[in-house]
Amino acid sequence: MIGVAMIVLVAAAVYANGAQPQQATPARATAAAAPRRAAPATAAAGTCVQCHGDVVKHPVVHPKATDCESCHVPKTRDAHQFDDKKCTVCHQMVKKDDKFVHGPVAAGECLACHDPHGSEEPQLVRVFGADLCQRCHVDMKARLAEKRFTHEPVKEDCATCHNPHASPSKYQIRVDGAEQCLVCHKTLRKELVTARVQHEAVSVDRECINCHDPHASDLGKQLKGTSMDLCLSCHDREQDAPGGKVQNVKGWLETHTDLHGPIRQQDCVGCHLPHDSEHFRLLRKDYPETFYSPYNPKNYELCFSCHEPDLAKVERTATVTGFRDGDLNLHFLHVNRTEKGRTCRACHEAHSSTEPKHLRETVPFGEWQLPVGYTQTPDGGRCAPGCHLPKEYSRKLAQTTHSPGER
């Protein structure tokens, strides 16, 4: 005969296998809307609840709360003795391929997170969502408090990204790599599938967390550094890319100090998209890929999003550009052609230069580095390039007669 009441001390699992909630709010709402109450007490439980009736007075109650002896050792040992192997009889939370097991689970300390009898929260957790995790992960709690931007799932429920018991992935991440991020970032998933060009940083090494901190940062989008710092952490050496090799940009900027505006502002994403693009080199908008291109304003959408479109539209001007001979617009002369129109890249560097107006010293023309040969003068300039005879221009007084054939 059991002479002393026995307390129920059994741990429930945080989440049932294969049924992982992605957000905290719906889980809390479900529990409130349909609380689980204990069934009428059995004879055994009836004896216990004479002293321990409060254990079942919760919105969420463990199903075994009506069968105390299923978790407590009866008769032969102290009446309150809990059999700590009982949780895994019902709850097999670590699967065969789970290489990474959460510390409390590995130690058999289910009760660190769960109340074994009843709780105000779903899955019998002692505290809901991120607050539960931060009871142990105090270093993360302190870090989140000092950062300006916190990832939304971190605010709500760490279990959105982490399995609280075990996982095949490090840190008990639910899904490996970028796939974890794309569970929520569905629009980006679609873009990556259909885009003409995908940034390799999204798919190599640590994938999304090459650039983003998954928890918090002082920078928007949880970036780990400024746009330029992040870009140059990889572009400090020559890189292979679908459109051909990409130069060592960091090294180039260190020796070519006349910087293009977006570079001065450390704004690489002013021209380049960070994840994927429909344009080569991950450019935001259209820009000709080649030395020659028939003139079409749309082809220069990237440049003309900052620069005056009339640069290439008007033949005569005294104000639109300083690159003119008298009032003849020499940008128009070079660019606005149906055949062999010179593109911006024929004369200008996109990132930086040692020459005025980001002019090139040379430009690739097939396998030849074609010289530009530009010299600035007080009222204009002269060039002796590899593409035509030496010419000079003056904004005050036209220096050269430019015939249609020369265009």
Image (spheres, grey):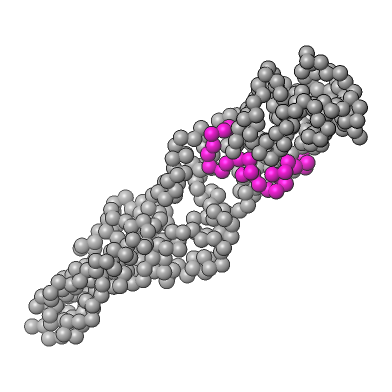
Does the segment drawn in magenta span residue 171?
Answer: no
Does the segment drawn in magenta span residue 272?
Answer: yes
Instruction: Magenta stretch: give its range.
Output: 255-280
Q: Which residue shows up at 73% across the image and 41% down it?
A: 260
Residue sitting farthest toward the top: 405
Residue 353 lies left or right of residue 67; in this view the side is right
- Residue 112 visible (yes or no): no
Residue 150 at x, y = what percent?
Answer: 51, 61
Q: Which residue shows up at 33% across the image and 53% down it?
A: 98
Residue 362 lies left or right of residue 158; in this view the side is right
Residue 158 lies left or right of residue 66; in this view the side is right
- Residue 311 visible (yes or no): yes
Nearer-the-camera pick, 183 or 250: 183
Q: Tell me which corner region of the image, top left, top right, bottom left or bottom right, holds residue 376.
A: top right
Q: Tell me which corner region of the image, top left, top right, bottom left or bottom right, holds residue 43.
A: bottom left
Q: Which residue shows up at 41% across the image and 61% down it?
A: 158
Residue 43 lies left or right of residue 171; in this view the side is left
Residue 242 at x, y = what percent?
Answer: 55, 30
225 to 156, vertically: above or below: above
Residue 167 at x, y = what percent?
Answer: 35, 54
Q: Tell me which corner region of the image, top left, top right, bottom left or bottom right, holds residue 42.
A: bottom left
224 to 401, vertically: above or below: below
Nearer-the-camera pick, 120 or 298: 298
Quarter that holds the C terminus: top right
